Image: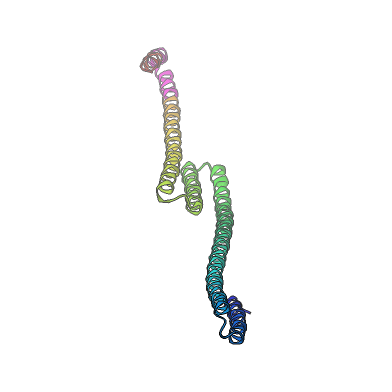
Amino acid sequence: MTNENVVLLKEEELIREASAKTAKLDVESFAKIGDEREQQRINAEKENVALKLKADLTQLGVDVERAKAQAAEKTARSLKGQAKAAERLAEAAKLEQRKISKLENQLKLGEKLLVIDEKLFQARLEEDRVLEASLKKQRVQAELETKIADLRAEGLGPALEALAIALATLNAKRSIAKVDQSLTRSNVEDEKSAAAKLKSLQDEGALLQARLGGRLEEVQLDQQIEKILEQTQI
């Protein structure tokens, strides 16, 4: 039975009780026709019955409205609780998805780095510095791409995400620059070493020719002076 039906039944009960009392008073009034004093009393009681019925119906309406308000408030609290629960579930799902995304990103990175590291090992065995430097930069780039993917999965907000990506990119550029600098330094050292070896061979050849031509002491002296001048420049 619905609440509305209960209210209707209560109204009918109040009206029925009031009608029964009024009917009883009507019978009493008929029995005492001619008794002015009794008629006045009966009429007063009828009026009281009518006033009480009106008051009871009014109170019933107030009670109904109060019950409706309480039910609405309870429903609102329940809906609010459900909404918060849904928010918590949604947030938990987001966190879980972020963890999954990060793990997937790390797995992909691991596969890429495995291939790059195998090539790096081979390049070092072959002493191919140019290829080694290129592979190192590929490694940095792969790590940067994974870092950016992780940051985008964090849900940091546009401004904070942009700053974090910019910082990660800057760090990657610095790492790449260090690789280039290391390669350049190695190339310069190789050139110096090659030049020194060539100079040593040239000096040995000059000494051999001087020995054959009887000018050994003169050439030795010239080479010593040249070395002194080089050390002075350094």
Say whether residue 60 is left or right of residue 170.
Answer: right
Asked whether 102 or 201 is in front, the reply is 102
Q: From the image, which quarter does the N terminus lie in?
A: bottom right
State yes or no: residue 220 in magenta: yes
Asked whether 180 or 128 is in front, the reply is 180
Horizontal and vertical percent for residue 86?
Answer: 56, 61
* Above or below for 174 versus 92: above
Horizontal and vertical percent for residue 107?
Answer: 59, 55
State yes or no: residue 75 in magenta: no
* Above or below for 6 versus 208: below
Asked whether 188 or 199 is in front, the reply is 188
Q: Main secondary structure of the magenta part?
A: helix
* Above or below for 54 versus 228: below
Q: How many marks?
A: 0
Horizontal and vertical percent for residue 40?
Answer: 54, 77
Q: Which residues are magenta?
A: 203-223
Which picture quadrant has residue 68? bottom right
Q: From the image, which quarter does the C terminus lie in?
A: top left
Q: How is the image coloured?
A: rainbow
* Above or below for 152 versus 176: below
Horizontal and vertical percent for residue 16?
Answer: 60, 82
Say whether residue 202 is left or right of residue 40.
Answer: left
